[in-house]
Image (cartoon, helix red, strand yellow):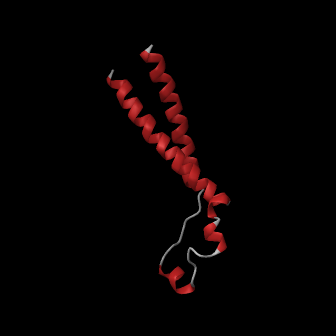
Amino acid sequence: MVEIIRNVVLVIYVLVCIILIVLATIQTRENSGASQTVTGAGANNFYEQNKGRTREGRLKRFTVIFGVLFVIFAIALSILFVM
């Protein structure tokens, strides 16, 4: 029974890894440096306040979710392979 659970969790873990790699590679790079301070691009404009509703915001949120799943499944696999 533990062998079946181990294999199922391993397959899900591999899928999470692949999805996480794809999500990380299709994201755009955020340039937040001193130039934004000089030009006035801060957190008070409309785009920054509604960034979570954009494509980049959704990609970032999904990347965080799959990153957490990656850690959870890694811990679960380490426990399952000790058994």
Please tell me whether residue 63 is drawn above or below residue 49 in the rendered image. Answer: above
- Which image quadrant for residue 81? top left
Image coordinates for residue 28, horizontal then vertical, percent: 59, 62
Image coordinates for residue 8, horizontal then vertical, percent: 51, 24
Quadrant of the image containing the C terminus:
top left
Q: Residue at x 61, y 59 (%)?
A: 57
Please tell me whether residue 71 is drawn above or below residue 6 in the rendered image. Answer: below
Q: Residue at x 47, y 44 (%)?
A: 68
Q: Residue at x 44, y 17 (%)?
A: 3
Please tell me whether residue 13 is drawn above or below residue 63 in the rendered image. Answer: above
In terms of depth relative to the viewer, which is nearer, 11 or 68?
A: 68
Image coordinates for residue 66, horizontal then vertical, percent: 53, 44
Looking at the image, which residue sits at the far bottom? Answer: 38
15 left or right of 77 in image: right
- Which image quadrant for residue 40? bottom right
Q: Residue at x 41, y 36 (%)?
A: 74
